[in-house]
Image (cartoon, coloured by chain):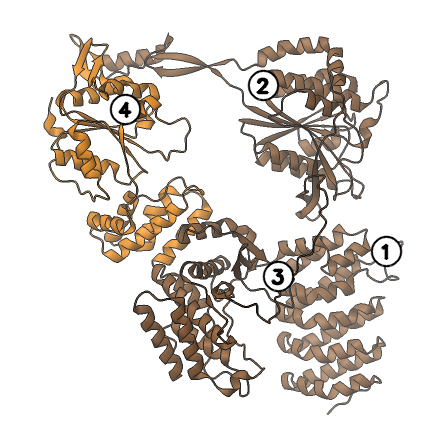
Chain colours: A orange, B brown
Amino acid sequence: MNAEQYRITEEPYYQPQKREIELFQAAYASRMPVMLKGPTGCGKSRFVEHMAWKLQKPLITVACNEDMTASDLVGRFLLDSSGTRWQDGPLTLAARMGAICYLDEIVEARQDTTVVIHPLTDYRRTLPLDKKGELIQAHPDFQLVISYNPGYQNLMKDLKESTKQRFSAMEFDYADAEVEADIVMKETGLERNPAESLVKIAQVSRNLKGHGLNEGISTRLLVYAATLIKNGIEPHDACRMALVCPIIDDADIRDTLHHAIDSVFA
Amino acid sequence: MKKIQCGFPRVQNVFGDCLEEAMKVLSEEGVSAYIDGAQALCKMGRGEEPVLAFLEKMPSAASILGEAIISDVVEFTRRLARTPNSRAIAPFLEGMNSAAKALESRELFLEYLELVREIKRRTTPRVHGIDSMYESACLPEFLKSVPRLFGQLSLGGLRNWAECGIRNHANDPDAQKSYFLLQSADSLAALQRERHGTLFVDHERKLDHYLRGLWAMEVSFVPYSLAFDILRKPVPHFDDLGIHLPDSYEDLHDVKGIDRYRALLAHICAHLRWSEPVMADNLSPFQRIAAEIFEDSRVEYLAMQEYPGISRLWKRLHPVPKEGACPEGWSEIRHRLFTLSRAIIDPDHGYSNPSILKYAEKFREIMEDGPSSTEQMVDLGVKFIAETRVQSDLSAKIYFEDTEVGYRDDNRLLWRFIEEGDEEEFDSKPVRHQEKAEMERLPPRLYPEWDNEGSHYRPDWVSVYEHLHPKGDPGRIDSLLSRHAAAAKRLKKLIDLLKPQNRVRIRYQEEGSELDIDVAIRSLIDFRSGAQPDARINMSHRHDGRSIAVSLLLDLSASLSDVPEGETRSKLEISQEAVSLLAWAVDRIGDSLAIGGFHSDTRHNVRYLHIKGYRENWGEEVKGRLAAMEAGFSTRMGAAMRHAGHYLSHQIAEKKLMLVLTDGEPSDVDIHGARYLIEDARMAVRELDAKGIHAYCISLDAKADDYVFDIFGNHYTVIDKAESLPDRLPKLFMMLTK
């Protein structure tokens, strides 16, 4: 068990928007499970990395998907030459070593899979491995963090009420225009003017959310666009490539955003 | 100077002046041809009007199209005079100029003459194939409308528009007349379709996105037409109803129509965001217009800070008034103000008038100072007027050249009035109390119809009225059903087979009901070869659902009350039984089914009778409506299918099926061509197909194969023994949906 590989050594850049660092630290102090809500690409994962670095704890991240089973989280027996061998899953590993376990996009996992985290998230802080016949008592440093995007336009994908009620939650959103421009500048070294223009385009798309767009342009995409501009690509082309093309299939909205790009970058 | 030999005194009166005009624009040969032409018209003996029109219009037309056109026109007129259509000569000559201006080349103008000839030929009543005895029904009307038409249509559009009128009203000269005079709704609809430019309707969604995205505003649009309001040209404006804007925009100065809309919306949104209404009562009209100019410039300045790219659009669309262009004795108030406006929006204006430069600079200083307000602009406007005022400003002749900014609104929201003005208010007419007619039916839905000869849709051609079917005695349907108890029993077996119970395998399960041998072997191989095996080697099953929405469309035309040979009951009664049995069966299977009947009495009154809705239960209500079914009128199938398809397309189901139960070919009393409605129905089937709806026809007409195949392709069944319908209809349905 090598905890070192899960440690974050360099400070990941994170620009706080409100008091989220303070709040997270308070939750960690009592090892309270935390749910991070917010649209895609607004900095949830970066925040967790930043906090793991700040608290000097290892971080184990699991990207959840539909095919994931409970054994993918907890662990399973494998056959080997001398019989069978137990292999810990990421959740078990984190509980043993006292890491922060981050389940990204938890709604993607099926509901019956999600249930295995329940005993870890209340006063018990245990993880029963029924196949192995072992009951793990979580390490005192262990904490569970999940991320959850409520914007999902899918009735089938939602968390069970019993799962939701085990977490404290923090709401994330795209930063204010000025802060978001700061983020883009810090991440890529772009000057202020083009960075502010990029943010304006993102805001246009966020205004259109729900009218043919499922999600607005995220900060992550803005960083991509800024990187392209920084690499010498003309701003119009960079925006089309990084901001418009990836998320838009609707011709009318594409046209409006192209016009917005032309308006913002004169 | 040549003289004209002509007995009309009015011609003699104007001839001198006209000749003088002509000599300015025409060469010597041209003038001579011009005089000869006028002479020929005089001798034609069709009165003085044609001669006067020719004298007045010919020179400028010839200057645009070349002088050769004079002889073309004279020849054309001479031929027209030999037919009974001499009444058309004067309007033709009157409209010649606008045609010349729109077409700009002799070749196109000759094509236009050809079009006039064709319209004449095709609208002239023929008796025994000879058409030289009667006057064309609507040629003069067409020629009178030509100036307006060329304002909006290209020659191709004009031809299509005329074609519609000729064909659609071939048997109704009065309707044709009002079509060509642009008085009927059909004519305006056809005109709207042929117009050039960017049509608002095609881009409404984009503009909505524009407002929402760039300005975070949600405002409704109220388009107005520039085509029909000739006296007062409406201007864009904003009021309680929303943004009023033109229904189409031509490209202008390299700015696309859609971008002109955006330029307009940007200007109005800028006002909404930054303008504050101010008191108007203490300001003179001059001061107000000056204040408006400064305020327009201010909000545009602020908008350009936010979206620098808009300036490119605005600069191109803003007129460029030329310094000193205003002639002596005219009021240059507007010219001066818009020069200033140009100077503000375009820093490279190159104007030298000191007061313009001074105020443009003052404006810039205020704007660069930070937060500005409407009040400041009013102040600036008042000062500008006071400083630059000259006597001639009060002249009644106002110089308008280059002073109209198309993308700006009329600023009606900028002003607040304490007192009611003396000016007449044109916009709000006194509301007359109207007795509200009781609404007995839903307003009609308009559908297009396919014109097979013209290969185009006739826009908004058919009005479909939807009614709730009247109710009868539901007990009748129950007794009908009990008569078919034996058939129902047989059906029940089929229904049980059809009920959703298909088992579908779900593979790759870690825990399932059975071992999936394929995957298990693969896992073992992985394991033996040292790779990590997949643990999901089981599989399980689930039941598959059935997701079908069905719309049953019943033809309720008059022929349905016929009693087929060798039968005691009418087709209507047999259909009733069949439909009841089908509805019962579908209800048992659990698919969602809608039933509607239709018949038509010309295109203005197609009735769609609602019998059962998709979510409605198979209960007393529905049975009652079914029991009251009656036959009457004709069969306009396409419109009914489009209407039923409209509802069906909104159902959420994997398969959508439309069953059409009919007893004859499509027909209606206002249709003369045999193929027209068949082709339209065929088109309707294609439209449904494009929406993912399968149309299937059950025909009771034994001789139906010819036309039913044309309409539905292979998707039809002809039931030649009507009495077997109750038995076959439900089975057919099950076969189709198995």
Dot 3 amino acid type: Ser
Q: Quadrant of the C terminus of chain B?
A: top right
What secondary structure is marked by label 3?
Answer: loop
Q: Which residue is labeled 1 in the image? A: B126
Label 2 and label 4 in one chain: no
Picture disc at residue B428: 3
Q: Residue at x 28, y 41 (%)?
A: A42
Amino acid, disc 2:
Gly
Residue to which mark 4 is pinned: A166
Asked whether the beta carbons under mark 2 and mark 1 sit within 8 Å of each other, the answer is no
Q: CA distance from mark 2 to mark 4?
A: 41 Å
Q: Is residue B568 visible?
A: yes
Q: Which residue extends farthest bottom? A: B1
Name the chain letter of the residue that bears numbered label 3: B
Residue B650's place in the image compared with B336, above or below, is: above
Horizontally, is B259 left or right of A112 in the view? right
Q: Residue at x 78, y 76 (%)?
A: B50
Could you say where residue B340 lies in the image, as x and y percent from the top left? 42, 76
Q: Nearer the N terminus, badge 2 or badge 1?
A: 1
Badge 4 density bin: few <14, some 14–19, many ≥20, Cα 10 Å: some
Neighbour class for label 1 at 10 Å: few (<14), some, many (≥20)? some
Q: Nearer the viewer, mark 1 or mark 4?
A: 4
How many numbered circles are shown? 4
Indicate the chain on which mark 1 is placed. B
| Picture quadrant of residue B641 | top right
